[in-house]
């Protein structure tokens, strides 16, 4: 005996809801196999469910498309900040710059270690330190570091912040859309279950095959178990089907 299987994806949920909606439009209330109350529930949830899914797909797609731009901004930000510090270290090593100037940038006075630039937070943190430190040092009469200049570093720094902020905004929108879908799923499942129960009850006095055939038109899904599929393909069953046909 095949069993009824409820939808387990958003696409299959929408398909089931649309099947019920179609039958509700095609049949007058007295011929419809489920109640007008549930027909109204279907009409109400479909637009909300579809809008939530559409919005989620749009925001997620935009987020994916923009990710290469974010990755590039992250890479360039790290590269220019690292190069700026390396140029400073080489200047100190040559004696062109004093080692105590590192204090302006929040770096140790001794050594030439590059601070960690592994994450976005690291790059933003040290980018700001480099920009603020260079500005303060030049204000006090220091010679600007060049190749790259702090102005070029700042362009990359600001670009990273801009792209990062936009990406975070997209992630937030995607998360909100996903939560909205998750919020609607239980109600969609309840509506589908209630409709399918009413449809099956309407045809309960019919032979099993005919009952399932009519219920399928309302979107009800039936699945044969593995052993039942094997029985359907057995020679005995096929001969019986030919005789009955």
Image (cartoon, rainbow, N blue to C red):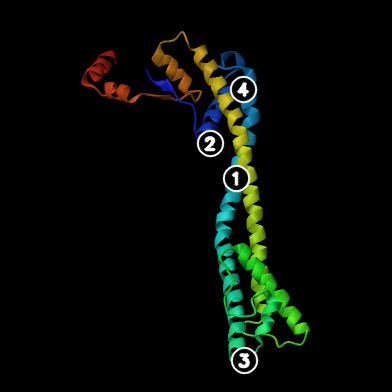
Left-right relation of 240 to 150: left
Q: Nearer the viewer, residue 182 or 91?
A: 91
- Label 4 or label 3, whichever lies nearer to me, is 3
Mark 2 highlights which residue?
A: 10
SS class of the residue under badge 1? helix
Q: Are marks 1 and 2 in contact (CB under 8 Å)?
A: no
- Label 2 or label 4, whichever lies nearer to me, is 2
Q: Position of residue 28 (x, y in %)?
A: 60, 17
Outermost residue on the top side: it is 205
SS class of the residue under badge 3? loop
Q: Is residue 204 above or below residue 235?
A: above
Q: In the rendered image, which quarter contains the N terminus?
A: top left
First along the sequence among labels 1 and 3: 1
Q: Quadrant of residue 20?
A: top right
Mark 1 highlights which residue?
A: 56
Q: CA distance from mark 4 to mark 3?
A: 83 Å
Q: Are marks 4 and 1 in contact (CB under 8 Å)?
A: no
First along the sequence among labels 1 and 2: 2
Left-right relation of 219 to 244: right
Q: In the rendered image, which quarter contains the C terminus?
A: top left
First along the sequence among labels 2 and 3: 2
Mark 3 highlights which residue?
A: 95
Q: Quadrant of residue 99?
A: bottom right
Q: Position of residue 236 (x, y in %)?
A: 22, 17
Q: CA distance from mark 4 to mark 1?
A: 26 Å
First along the sequence among labels 2 and 4: 2
Mark 4 highlights which residue?
A: 39
- Label 2 or label 3, whichever lies nearer to me, is 3
Q: CA distance from mark 2 to mark 4?
A: 19 Å
Q: Position of residue 87 (x, y in %)?
A: 59, 83
| Residue 232 visible in the snapshot | yes
Within 10 angstroms of label 2, few (less than 14), some, or many (20 or more) residues?
some
């Amino acid at each position: 005996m095949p069993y009824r299987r409820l939808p387990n994806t958003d696409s299959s949920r929408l398909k089931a809801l649309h099947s019920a909606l179609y039958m509700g439009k095609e049949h007058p209330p007295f011929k419809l196999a489920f109640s007008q109350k549930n027909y109204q529930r279907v009409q109400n949830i479909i637009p909300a469910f579809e809008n939530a899914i559409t919005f989620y797909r749009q925001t997620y797609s935009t987020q994916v498309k923009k990710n290469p731009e974010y990755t590039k901004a992250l890479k360039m930000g790290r590269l220019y900040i690292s190069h700026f510090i390396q140029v400073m270290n080489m200047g100190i090593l040559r004696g062109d710059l004093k080692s105590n100037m590192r204090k302006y940038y929040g770096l140790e006075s001794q050594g030439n270690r590059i601070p960690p630039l592994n994450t976005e937070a690291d790059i933003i943190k040290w980018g700001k330190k480099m920009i603020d430190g260079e500005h303060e040092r030049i204000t006090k009469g220091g010679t600007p570091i060049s190749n790259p200049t702090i102005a070029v570093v700042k362009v990359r720094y600001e670009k990273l912040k801009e792209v990062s902020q936009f990406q975070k905004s997209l992630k937030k929108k995607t998360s909100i859309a996903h939560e909205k879908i998750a919020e609607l799923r239980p109600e969609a499942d309840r509506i589908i279950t209630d409709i399918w129960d009413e449809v099956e009850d309407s045809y309960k006095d019919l032979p099993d095959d005919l009952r399932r055939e009519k219920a399928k038109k309302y979107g009800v899904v039936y699945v044969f178990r593995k052993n039942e599929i094997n029985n359907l393909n057995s020679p005995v069953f096929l001969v019986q089907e030919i005789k009955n046909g």
